Amino acid sequence: MPSTFRLLYVAYLLVLPSGDSFRLPFKDLLMPPPSSRFLKTNLNGFLGLGNNNNNKQEEARLVQEVNLGDPVVMINNVPTVAQGQLSTITLQRYLSSLVSSDESLREMEGLMLSIAMACKTISTLVNRAGINQLTGLETDVMGTRSGSQSGKGKNKAKKNIQGEDQKKLDVLSNGVLKNALKFTGKLGLLASEEEDEALLIESALDSRYVAVFDPLDGSSNIDASICTGTIFGVLEDDTVELKNEYKRNNDDCVRNADAECVSSTEALLQPGSQLAASGYCMYSSSTILVFTLGGSHPVIGFTLDPQLGEFVLTHPNMRVPKRGTYYSVNEGNSWLWDASIRHYIDKIKRGEGETKKRYSSRYVGSMVGDVHRTLLYGGIFGNPGDVKHRNGKLRLVYECSPMSFLVEQAGGGSCTSDGGSVLEVVPESVHQRSTCWLGSIEDVQELKSYLTPEETN
Ligand code: AFP
């Protein structure tokens, strides 16, 4: 039996991901398994066997204590995964270590943990969508699930305020996030792609933060099991507007169909440069939460370990490569683009751009997936707008701004299709659209050299 265990253990190591933060030293392949007990529980989880709840805590303890030791290295007071070790730094542990050196981050810690909790729930919903019949469109007929993709006939597809069909999972994810954030008591106001109006959280009016989010971006891909994601931004509300408004409206609070108190959006209409935090959670072959708290904080990524049910630190300091060789844009619209953008894309794909390298096209059509790849591999992602849609398809407040903030914080660049700064655009409404490009700093600079402000006038 011991030799069978050894064989299985080697097979297990061979199929582990091999990124920097995950790579095990080759010598580990030659060493005996640390304990057959560990191997058994770990393999059970890995193979999806014996996922008995009673075993979960024991598995977690064994994974952490027996196999992995304590691979934490402190860099600038921030716990980081030691080279060659599997991560045992959970999101909670990471955030509490930040709070212990900076007490002012305590509210943010609560908020981030709630977002992470919601993302775990959405990840499960997305994973089980096909099994639990959560694919397809949300319909207008209460309690009826059409199962139809057309939205025609009696069960007409529900639309969001922008006239887009809502998927069942759009609506569910929105509810999950809304509830998670409401109950933190740390958030006074929130806005979402799937909400017509901004919502005032009556129980948290003294709170310091307001949040914006796209609960399930890329949901048109969901029925094909292609990656989707949640995008979020957190802004500080340093005005007294929120409380004053509540006092004004308290007696006669305007409520929406769900009896929620709707609000004006003053505190949410801040440029992206004012974001206190932003990030996304990608639901793909792994569920990965990537965020930054701005300032001197890095962009960090946590992967949901399905065995532990925890986000563990896997990408301690994400930096966008200065250059890439991918462009990511919906080329089906190229005939409608401005000439300058057509010219730029044409040059880089022919290898006639600054690098003289031929760029390849990569486009998922799910912003979170496209941005995540761009963050890791470099290159440029864009939603340029065209003669029909001058401001493109993406939303400024909960897509372009949070993603641009994150990418710039990781050393990348971003701009609008007239070469201006995405982060300086002051929104006039929560659901306003904006063109946006982001990615490797030198690729964005090269694009900008093609753009002229006149093009968009
Ligand atoms: P859905 O959420 O409707 O799938 O839209 C996804 C999205 O907002 C963004 O994630 C994509 O980058 C972009 O739209 C794709 O737009 P095109 O389909 O026009 O390329």
Image (spheres, rainbow, N blue to C red):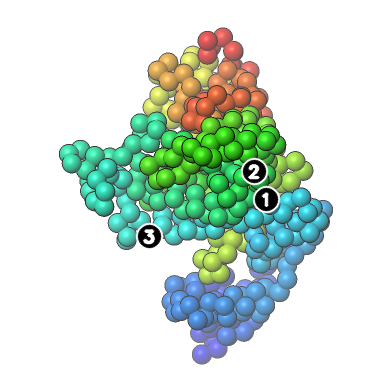
Disc 3 target residue: 128
Which image quadrant for residue 91? bottom right
Give the CA distance from mark 1 to mark 2: 8 Å
Which image quadrant for residue 407? top right
Amino acid at the residue labelled 3? Arg
Disc 1 target residue: 108
Q: Nearer the viewer, residue 341 or 312?
A: 312
- Seen as rendered, the residue at the extreme bottom is 1
- Image coords of residue 366 (percent x, y): 45, 40
Q: Neighbour class for label 2 at 10 Å: few (<14), some, many (≥20)? A: many
- Seen as rendered, the residue at the extreme left is 153
- Image coords of residue 250 (percent x, y): 54, 40
Q: Earlier in the sequence, mark 2 or mark 3?
A: 3
Q: Neighbour class for label 3 at 10 Å: few (<14), some, many (≥20)? A: few
The answer to whether one can see residue 347 in this image is no
Residue visible at 46% across and 25% down in the picture: 392
For numbered disc 2, what is the local secondary structure?
strand
Q: Earlier in the sequence, mark 1 or mark 2?
A: 1
Disc 2 target residue: 209
